Image (spheres, rainbow, N blue to C red):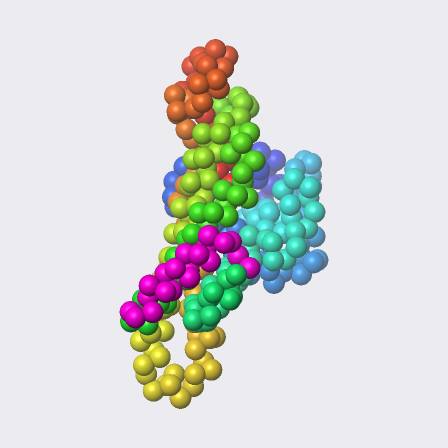
């Protein structure tokens, strides 16, 4: 078996990102919680494989599958720009377990939502408390969906706030070859909208399915006699939903999204038409 060629582009995802299936496979790998269990030695070994390959040195006996595995392990633990190891809870592979605990607790202790959620954004708290007061006289199942409304409101407020600089100065837009053409606020708005939609959709299964199941189970004698099982069972249900919802919703829109030149700001549009008259579509990174 010959040595692995050096023309494999590990700078890009392994699967075709122009299709939903390709994006889903990519994000299922990126958000795999099992990567959190890897030891420091395993992470360093993956980093060495990736850095050596980028430098033109192939690890003896390395297969293409092993190279891609090392690339995704490396991407899951190290910062793409600085190369430094990311703190455990900040890694993409921590998305499911971290959100599982947060969402599970919100659903379990939704009756104390006003206190529990006060540390989050004011808009989300206002939404939660307002809906909570409206659902006091409605069936308990309706009240269980209040946390979802709070999360949706939080995403609509928090993501634009965290990326407000992009709304002021824009984000880089490039041509198909990756050549930077300028900065666009319009592209930033579209990218932020896509991320907000993805985050809200990500929360739907985890915050809609478990409440229905738990509302049914809590009426059964099994849980009535074992109320302490409610919280771990709910958190487990949330985790199961997030394992699928997180990568599938991250894959709703291409990471490298596109926008028509005629939809850009007049100044940038004129600049592109003058310097690159044949360009009709530009590309940008939508973020996560």
x%, y% of residue 64? 56, 45
User: Which residue is depicted at the point 69% across and 58% down?
Assistant: 40
x%, y% of residue 19? 38, 40
Location of residue 147 by image quarter: bottom left
x%, y% of residue 62? 62, 47
User: Which residue is depicted at the point 61% across and 58% down?
Assistant: 89
> 281 or 169: nearer the eye?
169
Residue 255 in the magenta stretch? The answer is: no
Q: Is residue 183 above or below residue 108?
A: above
Furthest residue toward bottom? 225
Location of residue 56 by image quarter: top right
Query: Magenta stretch mostly in which secondary structure?
Result: helix
Q: Magenta residues, as a range?
A: 119-138
Furthest residue toward left? 138
Left-right relation of 190 to 221: right
User: Which residue is depicted at the point 62% across and 49% down?
Assistant: 74
Q: Quadrant of the N terminus?
A: top right
Residue 120 in the magenta stretch? The answer is: yes
Marks counted in the figure total: 0
Q: Is residue 228 above or below residue 4?
A: below
Q: Is residue 269 above or below residue 38?
A: above
């Amino acid at each position: 078996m010959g040595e692995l060629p050096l023309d494999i582009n590990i700078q890009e995802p392994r699967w075709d990102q122009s299709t939903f299936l390709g994006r889903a496979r990519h994000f299922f790998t990126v958000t795999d919680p099992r990567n959190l269990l890897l030891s420091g030695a395993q992470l360093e070994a993956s980093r060495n494989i990736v850095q050596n390959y980028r430098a033109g040195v192939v690890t003896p006996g390395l297969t293409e599958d092993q190279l891609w595995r090392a690339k995704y392990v490396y991407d899951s633990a190290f910062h793409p720009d600085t190369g430094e190891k990311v703190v455990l809870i900040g890694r993409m592979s921590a998305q499911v377990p971290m959100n599982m605990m947060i969402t599970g607790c919100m659903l379990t202790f939704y009756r104390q939502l006003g206190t529990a959620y006060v540390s989050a954004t004011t808009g989300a708290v206002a939404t939660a408390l307002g809906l909570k007061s409206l659902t006091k006289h409605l069936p308990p199942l309706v009240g269980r969906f209040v946390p979802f409304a709070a999360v949706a409101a939080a995403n609509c407020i928090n993501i634009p706030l965290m990326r407000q600089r992009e709304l002021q100065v824009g984000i880089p837009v490039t041509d198909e070859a990756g050549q930077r053409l300028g900065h666009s606020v319009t592209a930033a708005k579209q990218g932020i909208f896509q991320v907000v939609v993805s985050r809200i959709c990500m929360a739907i299964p985890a915050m809609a399915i478990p409440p229905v199941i738990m509302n049914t189970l809590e009426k059964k004698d099994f849980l009535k006699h074992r109320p302490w099982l409610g919280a771990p069972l709910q958190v487990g249900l949330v985790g199961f939903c997030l394992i699928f919802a997180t990568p599938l919703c991250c894959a709703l829109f291409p990471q490298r999204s596109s926008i028509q030149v005629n939809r850009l700001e007049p100044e940038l549009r004129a600049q592109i038409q003058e310097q690159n008259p044949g360009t009709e579509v530009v590309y940008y990174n939508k973020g996560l």
